[in-house]
Image (tube, helix red, strand yellow):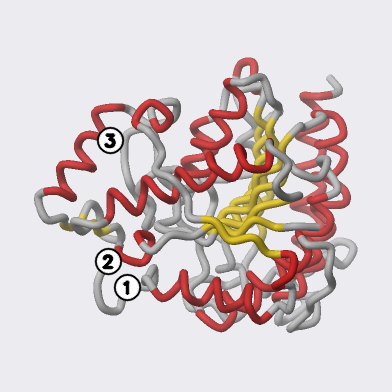
Amino acid sequence: MAVLVGSHAACAEHDPGAGHPESPSRVAAALRGVAEAGVAEAVVHFSPRRATREELARVHDVGYLSYLEERCVAGGGRLDPDTVVTPASFDAALRAAGAGLEAAERLGRGEATAAFLAVRPPGHHATATGAMGFCLVNSVAVTAAALVARGERVLVVDWDAHHGNGTQAAFYDEPDVLFVSMHQYPFYPGSGAVDEVGAGAGAGSTVNVPFPAGTAGDAYRLAVDELVVPAAEQFSPTWLLVSAGYDAHRADPLTDLALTAGDFADLTERLSRLVVPGRRIVFLEGGYDLDALAASVGATVAALAGERYRPEAASSGGPDGSGGAARGGRAELVVTAARRLHERYVHP
């Protein structure tokens, strides 16, 4: 089972500055994880093209894109307290968005069964009109919008520790995108409550699973098995896109969740079954402990290749037992509430 791995040198040239957690070294760490996974024979590297302005405009306001480019050309600067651009940032964002588009094209030609994109800056917080949370262009949303434009039905699963507010907003009233976010809550950016379920024609096509701090992998597996799988069977997706943030790892310095590399392998295996081979793309989002990032990416890519690689065992129960999936625990209650809300819309 061949796996495309997309990356580009431009993605390492976007540098928010010394001490910023979203550093250029994240790309090298991700690629190190791929190399250490022992699946070199299955990996096919490619260098992604730039996304075009027309492709980006399916998701982003053209005025925002012009502003972003002009800020970069003028030398860059701080766009918000967390998000910084430099002269190289716009090209990096174009390559990151283009990676998903090119991966879909290559998979459509039968070059592999899945793709992993080791690109940055991340994208899932970027909205139609602005950057935020380290994100400039919403790469997963740009790819999803391109697929929908040609008649596909797209399942987007976001397991980053932070809610994918930008992706949710892009498809909140879109019936051909099923967006699922599993994240720490309450937490940045403040959205992602369980009752955010979509609107209009898209009512029921947004599913939020807001886990408490301390939640471990057993709760995520429960959410996939009891909520995501049934929702996907009802939705019948033709493509799976994953916003793979590894800041849900227990070692991450910015978050309070308790997952391991083994958990990300489990999630990848379970989610991959929801679409046919050749229709799976995984996008790097967050993840700020470099060793945890490397191990987790390696486990993910190995799972995409159909190989078992577990540099860490899967987790359960949370650090104090209160965040796990034990019957009656907070995480199980969250999953139950999300499932019942979703079923209210798909089975009125």
The residues bearing labels 3 and 1 have C-alpha atoms spaced at a distance of 24 Å
Name the element at disc 1: loop
Q: Which residue is mark 3?
A: 65
Q: Which mark is residue 184?
A: none
Q: Which residue is mark 2?
A: 16
**Do tag 2 and tag 1 residues touch (Cβ < 8 Å)?**
yes
- Residue density around tag 3, few if under 14, some if 14–19, many if 20 or more, within 10 Å: many
The residue sitting at 70% across, 47% down in the picture is: 111
Work out whether 20 lies above or below 141: below
Amino acid type of the residue that numbered disc 1 sits on in the rendered structure: His
The location of residue 216, given as percent across then percent down, is 73, 71
Give the camera-side residue of 87 and 251: 87
> In which quadrant is the N terminus drawn?
bottom right
- Quarter residue 64 falls in: top left
Q: First in sequence: mark 2 or mark 3?
A: 2
- Residue density around tag 1, few if under 14, some if 14–19, many if 20 or more, within 10 Å: some
The residues bearing labels 2 and 1 have C-alpha atoms spaced at a distance of 6 Å
Amino acid type of the residue that numbered disc 2 sits on in the rendered structure: Pro
- Quarter residue 43 falls in: bottom right
Is residue 186 visible in the rendered image? The answer is no
The residue sitting at 67% across, 24% down in the picture is: 176
The location of residue 243, given as percent across then percent down, is 59, 52
The location of residue 182, given as percent across then percent down, is 66, 53
- Residue density around tag 2, few if under 14, some if 14–19, many if 20 or more, within 10 Å: many
The residues bearing labels 2 and 3 have C-alpha atoms spaced at a distance of 19 Å
Q: Which residue is mark 1?
A: 20
Amino acid type of the residue that numbered disc 3 sits on in the rendered structure: Leu
Give the camera-side residue of 128 and 52: 52
